[in-house]
Image: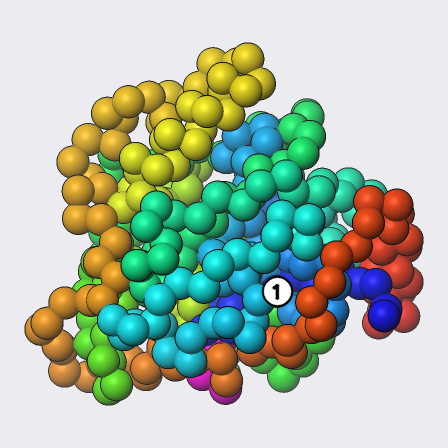
Amino acid sequence: MRIRLLLLALAVSGCSGGGEGVDSVASGILGGTADTDHPAVMATGHQVGVGQYCTGYLIMPDLVLTAHHCTADPATLPSTVCTPTALMPPSLPASDILVVAGPSSASSASIYPVAEVHDVPNRDSSTLCGNDMAVLQLKQPVTGVEPIALRMDAAPEVGETLSVVGYGQTDLSDPNSFGDRHALSGVHVDHVGYEEGPNGAYTVEGEFTVDTGPCAGDSGGPAFAADGRAVGVMSRGSKSSCQHMVYSRVDAHAEWLESLARDSADRLAIDPPSWAEAGAAGAAGAAGAAGSGGAAGSAGAPPSSGGASEDSGCSVRAPARGQTSAALLALMAAVLRLRLRRRA
């Protein structure tokens, strides 16, 4: 078996990123630029197989927030995500998942094995739509990098300007244009909450969409508000257009995320961040993440969120299940560096 780092992109749809307009999708993170300013944004994925990349971001020295579908076996992901029967699959064992820090996922020497994968509460009875989050607990904390604060006291608003970061596809015409971290500002929130699609819900409460840009491999990446706090986790969208991409709201999962952060602070013997203090979220997250969506639809709805196919912003090729020992981590990094040089 060839040992490579699989950074699994969204098998249910799009990924993180952003866009300044339809005409700017040929470069950067579909319009962005190479990024060295966000070291807390990291690549995430599987230790075995071949596939696209995912993104995540450090919220505590030993906690990385990402999309749940990035931690699951692609073969177990539902074909559609916004239906009451599209329940969340279990995450792979922590030993199958890695986090890679640095501007390039292939050139970085900073590889962090995962000790535990934290799924959202009540995963077994929750749908992926509205709950597409997971937290990776690292075996060792990341040093020298400031974790990203979460905005728990206010939900995203339609028209709000965001910036996004991710390791995903930078050119719609080149599915191999992924693996380097890019950033983009000037992204706008174009919808918050439930929205009807032609085949059912497109988004549910606890989600929002951005106007254009996010693409395959950016799943799990952050959307930043003007003050630098993260408001969402990239979830899904159409990989063929990379427009109207869906994010899960962090404030809708405030209680769970705050609890994990406080546990981390206890574990590391440090003070918890201000956003994780009990009650910090206020009423902003009260809506929660409605797994099966609402009732009212809207005219001119966007395309269906789809499943693990063309409309699933990040199609995957399911790898053979297996584990990679810690002794192979250095070899894995060397193989990734070689792939990048050959591609260049």
Left or right: residue 250 versus residue 138 is left
Residue 122, image x and y in percent?
32, 50
140 or 205, which is in the foreground?
140
Can you say which quadrant of the picture contains the N terminus? bottom right
Relative height, residue 26 to residue 335 (above, below): below
Q: Residue drawn 31% across and 38% down?
A: 254
Decide whether the magenta segment is chiefly helix, strand or loop. Answer: loop
Q: How is the image coloured?
A: rainbow
Q: Is residue 153 left or right of residue 70?
A: left
For residue 45, above or below residue 306? above
Residue 331 is situated, as x and y percent measured from the top left of the image, at: 90, 53
Q: Is residue 230 left or right of residue 6?
A: left
Which contiguous range is marked in magenta? 310-314
Q: Identity of the amino acid at label 1?
A: Leu
Q: Position of residue 246 (x, y in %)?
A: 37, 64
In what element is the residue under mark 1? loop
The residue shown at (22%, 67%) is 292
